[in-house]
Image (cartoon, rainbow, N blue to C red):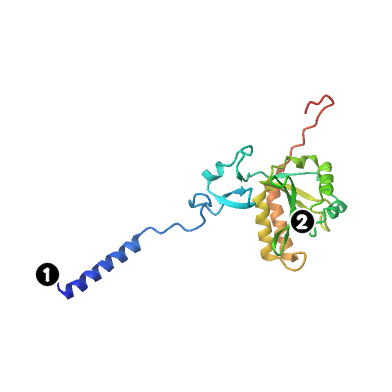
Amino acid sequence: MTGPGNAGIDSASALSVLRRIASTRPAQPAGERCEMCAEPIAEAHQHVVDLESRSLLCTCRPCYLLFTDSSAHLRYRSVPDRYLSFEPFELGQAQWDELEIPVGLAFFFFNSALGRTAAFYPSPAGATESELSLDAWASVQAANPAITMLTPDTEALLIRSPGPDRERADCHLVPIDACYELVGRLRRVWKGFDGGQESRQELAGFFDRISSRSRPAPAPAAADPEGRHG
């Protein structure tokens, strides 16, 4: 028969066993997880756009591949990894002023739910939408027909206006998540109305990186007098 003293020894032994089990149990993997299936994902991962909420979801590769067909009628769209540069890009200071963007940088994408191009610019509050003049944007497209190759919802035109250190505007076609990454970087260092020196350095470094990844955009197909495309 087990006495009170033995019961105390047994309880202590059981507690010791539980502690050993807890200490040897594999730890849950740290880091981010796919927002669709909850699988662990690397720090560098791909994204999917929720077309209803306009939010970006971090995804694993299998979930990303489910939504790569842009012709399918789905709520989600995978963000492609395409970087293009447009040179020359025709946009003078007067045209930029007509777009009514209060700073010298903005990104533009076609919002399929609204059926129009939307414009956002960085600010201390993050990505801020601009009331884009459709006539002003139409004139930019007319001067640069190649930019119409933009994929709706998932790609954006990142445009830096002419400035004191640049005679011409810069324009790159980039994944839309790259634009939000840039806005987040600028928000962390933003000072004053125009962002300050540190934000300008961050912006210059970002454009250097996307310039190194970009390839020249192909010329738009031209129609001949009989209606055939070149």
Q: Can I make out residue 90 in this image?
A: no
Position of 136 relative to 199 (above/below): above
Q: Nearer the viewer, residue 14 or 189?
A: 14
Considering every residue shown, the one lying at the far left of the view is 1
**Which percent across, then down, holds residue 24?**
34, 61
Residue at the spot of label 1 = 1
**Residue 139 in the figure: left or right of residue 196:** right
Residue at x 62%, y 48% (from the top left corner): 49
Q: Can I make out residue 215 in this image?
A: yes
Residue at x 71%, y 53% (from the top left corner): 207
What is the secondary structure assignment of the residue under circle 1?
loop
Q: Amino acid at mark 2?
A: Ser
Label located before the other in sequence (1 or 2): 1
Alpha carbon of mark 1 to alpha carbon of mark 2: how far? 82 Å
Residue at the spot of label 2 = 130
Considering every residue shown, the one lying at the far right of the view is 94
Please identify the quadrant where the N terminus is shown: bottom left
Position of 154 relative to 201 (above/below): above
